[in-house]
Image (tube, rainbow, N blue to C red):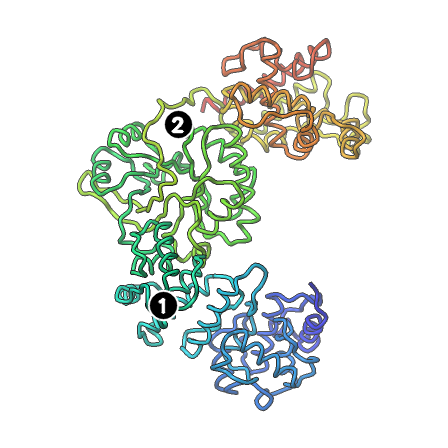
Amino acid sequence: MADEMVRLAQRFVNTTYNNGATLGISKLEENGVTGWPVMYALTRALQYEMGITALSDSFGPTTLATIGSKYGKLDETTVPSANFARILQSALYCKGYDGGEIDGTYNARVKAAVEKLNQNMGVSATYPGSSLWPKVVKGLFNMDAYVTIGGGSDTIRSIQQWLNGRYILRKDFYVIPCDGYHSRDVAKSMLFAIQYELGMADGTANGVFGPGTQSGLKSHTVSNGTTGVWAQLFTAAMILNKRNVPFGNFTSSVQSGVESFQSFVKLPVTGNGDFPTWASLLVSYGDQSRPGTACDGVTMITPPRAQALKDAGYQYIGRYLFNPSTTSLPEKQIQPGELATIKEAGLRCFPIFQTWSRSADYFSYNQGTSDAFKAIDWAQYHGFKPGTIIYFAVDYDAMDGEVTEYIVPHFRGVMRTIGENSSYGVGVYGPRNVCQRIADAGYSATSFVSDMSSGFSGNLGYPMPTNWAFDQIATLTVGSGSGSIEIDKNIASGRDTGQGDFDPGGYTDGVDVDLDKDAYQAPMLTDVKTYLESIGVPETGGDGWTDSDWATLGGISTTKAYELVLSADWLFTSLARQLKLRKALIQAPVLWELRKMNPLDVAADEAVKAGLDDDCSTGWGQIFAWVTIDARNYCMQQGIINGSPLTDDDIPGVWKDLNGDPTYNIRSVAYLTVYNAHQLNKPRPSLTTGLADTQALLARYNGTGDDAAQYGRELIGLYNVLESYNQLSRSK
């Protein structure tokens, strides 16, 4: 929401520092909205007024020290200039406080705002009155909030204020937000607080859960009846982990909360704040010495390794369905005979699917769909039974905004595909925030938590996900000699026990693969164009439409239709492999219908959108909603796909999906192909379906009668062109 005083603050920066480019102060948009650009500009302006020559967005040690050395504290007697005061007034407005009229005076309104700021930060006992001390100024020039913001906890805010008030005079402790939310900064401040209470000196205390901190905590067990600062720190840690206990003394209600927490994270239930409990509250990996019964790794499980793992108390082994690299970690993927070894040893396996999932731009709805199809393919190939949960990896430190924009849509594609095309379940492997966000969205059954990455922002400040199944806490080597194997040790919750028995496995012989585009994209297009031209379909236009009308009103050229089909090659391949049929049987009608789109198709779509009609053929495959409903219902009845039966009431929603979601449309083309075989009383299409039946299926795509027969004669030639290049790709 725009604020007039923030807008005036932005104008002040722009007009006062119109040499901004020279000074490194960017010109601000005068929109009345606060944000990091405004704070960075004000920080640089403050540095300039103090005589710092190397300006920076960061309010770092030099800026902090300069305030202390030059002024001690800032108030009406020490502020050196009117512009200096205006910078402070502007910063106050950007933080939601009344900074006066930005008139360059440290006036009564500024004093009142500073007093309120000190109170909100929790430092007013240390910094009484209306002066701005250096660390408070540092806290003023950032985007942290010092009041409870929407959905925040007042109890957490009181803990944040308590930490600020108690430790603000320590050298490396800076004002933390008091917004009612746990965060990375709050998590680190808790470690500083514990180190200070253990007696560590400034410079030794570093906010890291190191050997000294761990050793100190082992002698600070708290229990029912404990009072004082250690009880306060422990109850604070409980509350920050979303445990509903009172902040302060260790009471019987705290003990009950501790027992519940210990049970949840699979610690011995003692009811005491012992070291393992402290560790689990303070860092994501907790006490790394505690025994685990699950593990994961990139090394083949041989009989000696299986025995070594079993002897060490492990029961569940996470292994990878697929390795996208042909050179790196050659045993990462489950190897032939390995699952039989696991079964023979009385162990159980949970499968992990990972390709190149190490940055935000990997993740999308379409990528999730593709990954899910590949995971189904590989899980069936290895012999994982229905009901197996497959863990899809998010193997990087995803920011919360990236989870919203990229990862949630990705898992929507995963869940939709796994749910529709298999009897497997969806799990997520990743940091705590990712796991909880995907669980909350309804896109995972269980979580495999990458807690060993304790510095990840998605782990710091986030509690254990509610549906966690495996908690990855340490890397170690088990066994010796031929039984030696490096693993990541995991704690198991019991929510998923993996699989201890396996089917003989699927097959991939003869199924389609992605087109080798480097080798075949150009010649395949040439042959497609040559064939279509031979039956009277030019590069553009046709069917009586002038090129001008046809292009203006939505027509697609042969080249464009071909490029669209190749852009979804991964999906055609996935569907063909899943249904065990030739992908050209799905590609041919889609390519044809894309090329044949004309102004009448566009008008029909607009009529449905406007409510003037209920249904029409639409989307890439030009399918009616009612036809899609019949085809999908048939495939559900046959156990080919999963889902709830559709009725005529679903026509509007199905049409919308067909029109707006190419992946849904292409899937429906595949299911219609299977349904058409039923309508023709022919065998279900397979990898060996002959040309006569293939032509009949293509004809049935356009209905019945002479027009449909002609459609089949035209499309069988297109099918042959596409299939010839698909065959070349799968023969490589």
- Check the image and report above or below for 706 versus 12: above
Q: Position of residue 31 (x, y in %)?
A: 71, 65
Q: Position of residue 46 (x, y in %)?
A: 58, 78
Quadrant of image for the N terminus: bottom right
Q: Is mark 2 on a helix, strand or loop?
A: loop
Q: Which of 618 and 332 is in front in this view?
A: 618
Residue 207 makes an appearance in the image? no
Please tell me in which quadrant of the rendered image residue 40 appears: bottom right
Return the mark for residue 679: none
Q: Mark 2 points at which residue?
A: 385
Q: In this view, does 599 lie to the left or right of 511?
A: right
Residue 496 makes an appearance in the image? yes
Q: Residue at position x 58%, y 19% from top? A: 634
Q: Where is residue 301 in the image (x, y as percent from the top left)?
A: 27, 35
User: Of all residues shown, which one is farthest toward the left?
Assistant: 481
* Amino acid type at mark 1: Ala
Q: Position of residue 485 (x, y in %)?
A: 25, 42
Cβ–Cβ under 8 Å for marks 1 and 2: no
Q: What element carries label 1?
A: helix
Return the mark for residue 231: 1
Query: What distance separates the C-alpha of mark 1 from that of mark 2?
Result: 49 Å
Q: Is residue 470 left or right of residue 648?
A: left
Please tell me in which quadrant of the rendered image residue 427 appears: top left
Quadrant of image for the C terminus: top left
User: Of all residues shown, which one is farthest toward the bottom?
Assistant: 77
Q: Nearer the viewer, residue 113 or 73?
A: 113
* Amino acid type at mark 2: Lys
- Check the image and report above or below for 669 versus 118: above
